[in-house]
Amino acid sequence: MVEMRRHVEFTAATSMPVYLYDPASPSQRGSTQNTNGLTGMVPKSSNLSVHTPEDLATAAAELNNRPRKILDCETPAQRFTRLLAGAS
């Protein structure tokens, strides 16, 4: 996981632990698998470069505007907006 190679530095700088999953173990990252399934456009081993930026923006908007039980039926976009408003 190239994107996580500096996780030790991140943890040292933020005091936030980083938990890594074992490669080829989808059961350890269930929320990722569920989210991928929600978009319907990113099958396993998909190459994202075949999708246009507009396709990816559409998928992101779909996910960010889908109510989530874990957020008390708010959408991620609503929760993010509310958190930003409280931070100012």
Image (tube, helix red, strand yellow):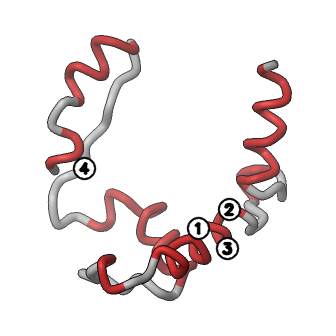
> Along the horizontal axis of the image, is 43 left or right of 76?
left
Looking at numbered disc 2 in the image, what kind of residue is underneath it?
Asn
38 sits left or right of 52 in the view: right
- Distance CA(mark 4)–CA(mark 3): 26 Å
State the residue in front, 48 or 21: 48
Whether 50 is drawn above or below 32: the answer is below
Number of numbered discs on residues: 4
Q: Which badge, 4 or 3, is on the more N-terminal residue?
A: 4
Q: Amino acid at mark 3?
A: Glu
Cα–Cα span, label 2 and label 1: 6 Å
Along the horizontal axis of the image, is 22 left or right of 29?
left
Residue 48: x %, y % from top left:
33, 77
Question: Residue at image x 24%, y 50%?
Answer: 21
Comparing 6 with 50, the one in front is 50
Amino acid carrying label 1: it is Ala
Tell me, yes or no, whether the two marked residues, 4 and 2, touch with CB atoms within 8 Å. no
Secondary structure under tag 2 reads: helix
Q: Residues within 10 Å of mark 3 (few under 14, many from 20)?
A: few
Q: Label 4, label 1: how many angstroms apart (C-alpha)?
A: 24 Å
Which residue, given by chain and number where applicable, does mark 4 sit on?
21
Of circles 4 and 1, the one toward us is 1
Q: Give yes or no for contact between labels 4 and 3 (Cβ–Cβ under 8 Å).
A: no
